[in-house]
Image: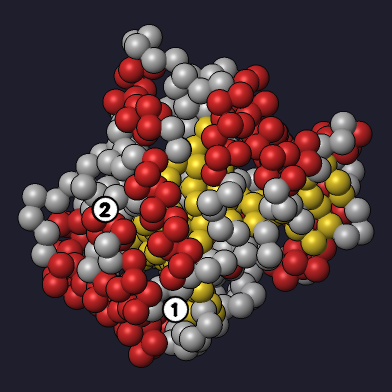
Amino acid sequence: MSRQTLLTQQHALQCLGTALGFVLLRSIATTHRLPPQADEASLYVHWPYCLKRCSYCNFNKYIPRNQNHAVMTACLQRETQTLLQLSQVSRISSVFFGGGTPSLAQPSTIAAVLETVSKHAHLSDEAEVTLEVNPTPAGKASLKDFTLAGVNRFSVGIQSLNDDHLRTLGRDHDSQHALWTVSEARTLCPGRVSVDVMFALPGQSVKSWESELEKLLPVCDDHVSLYQLTLERGTQLFKQVDSGELSVPGDDVTAVMYNSARGVLEKAGFRQYEVSNFAKNNAVSEHNIGYWKGRQYIGVGPGAHGRFVLRAVGGVQREARTQTLEPDVWIREVQRHGHGTRRRIQLDHHGLLEEVLVMGLRMNEGITQQHWKLFSPEDDLQQIFGMSEKVQEFQAGGLLKLNNRGLRCSWEGLALLDSILPTMLLELEMFFKKDCTQGNA
């Protein structure tokens, strides 16, 4: 199940591939200064297998014909070791097991990866270790075993509590399975359970969406993630909508759904701290905050993404790294080379700032001047954006706030972030072009 963001839809985070879809990555070195916090990183581990493919899903996941857990475990351990050694980080701040359906992995696999991490970097006993869970009977049965393996936080992909919607999405659970799984997870990790819910589903109305949220809130824990359904070409659901068999809410209705959900969650005590994420009792996702604050992360497993400095080979700039997608090919590459990195792009100073901008504006607090200076001591936010007519228009329209504290979206601006970001990235690019021209004059 995925951590697609509301406005850019992805995994993860997940990792951040599509969340960085606007970003222009450059390979021209402009600085030899190490990015901040180069001695620590978070770790994302991708388990690519699922029992079935949901009708809306185009992520890197596979239905295994025959699955060798021992081989997969050994390769995840080896790639973890290799990338940790390349990065030379001394500390791993958090670990996130995503997929795919990582709750289909054996708990011994989770334990083995965490043991490998601890051998090569410091992993605190209090560090956040999250496992994505698909609320099927197969996933629920071993939740306790996963906590014994080292997991202390669950992210449960319930998606909907409407059984008709679940069938349309092609999910392999029903609403009762979802409620059981959330209850079990809360018993095991009280205060550290997130639920993922989708909106703008076929046949969904604002009223039915609000009703579903009201049904969800009494049973959920302290964290909720909202994801707007995105129709991806090539998926079964896209074909059904494209052919007229199904219809989804229009943009105006979708916007009402999003803002309505924000109001319902706020009334229930949940604070929005990012475009798609809400928490009470400060139960934020520390791992995802690392992404949004531009910190280093190491991606392990088929199709995983990473951003870190290769200090072991004298690196001083971050690399954007993507691992080989196909599990069988990835396994062979790890067995042969120790890792399955397929794509490497060096991030120059400008490229790194683009990522800090894109991810930072997703947060409710935005980007503080102090945080920006960690990455750009020479050029502050006021210098870059303060004289821009477009930015001034955003400010006058109540969408953006730029002051001595920093840069952030307003409540209304967060809902329109996808339309704001291209302008902000263009302004950043124009500033660097102007700066470069003046420097060559």
193 left or right of 360?
A: left
* Residue that appears at 72% across and 71% down: 374
Residue 265 lies, in percent from the top left, at 68, 45
- Marking on residue 299: none
Instruction: Please tell me in which quadrant of the rendered image residue 352 appears.
Output: bottom right
Against 32, is 211 above or below?
Answer: above
264 left or right of 250?
A: right
Q: Which residue is mark 1?
A: 87
Is residue 140 visible to the viewer in this orientation of the structure? yes
**Which badge, 2 or 1, is on the more N-terminal residue?**
1
Residue 109 lies, in percent from the top left, at 25, 73
> Amino acid under label 2?
Pro
Q: Residues within 10 Å of mark 2 (few under 14, many from 20)?
A: some
Extreme residue toward the left, this view = 66
Front one among 26 and 290: 290
Front one among 6 and 352: 6
Tell me how far mark 2 sits from mark 1, CA to CA: 38 Å
Front one among 281 and 130: 281
Against 378, is 310 above or below?
Answer: below
Against 244, is 80 above or below?
Answer: below
Residue 312 lies, in percent from the top left, at 42, 83
Q: Residues within 10 Å of mark 1 (few under 14, many from 20)?
A: many
* Residue that appears at 38% across and 74% down: 147
**Total marks drawn?**
2
- Dot 1 falls on a residue whose secondary structure is helix
Extreme residue toward the top, this view = 244
Residue 217 lies, in percent from the top left, at 59, 47
Q: Which residue is mark 2?
A: 137
Of badges 2 and 1, the one in the foreground is 2
* Residue that appears at 67% across and 26% down: 256
Instruction: Please tell me in which quadrant of the rendered image residue 236 appears.
Output: top left
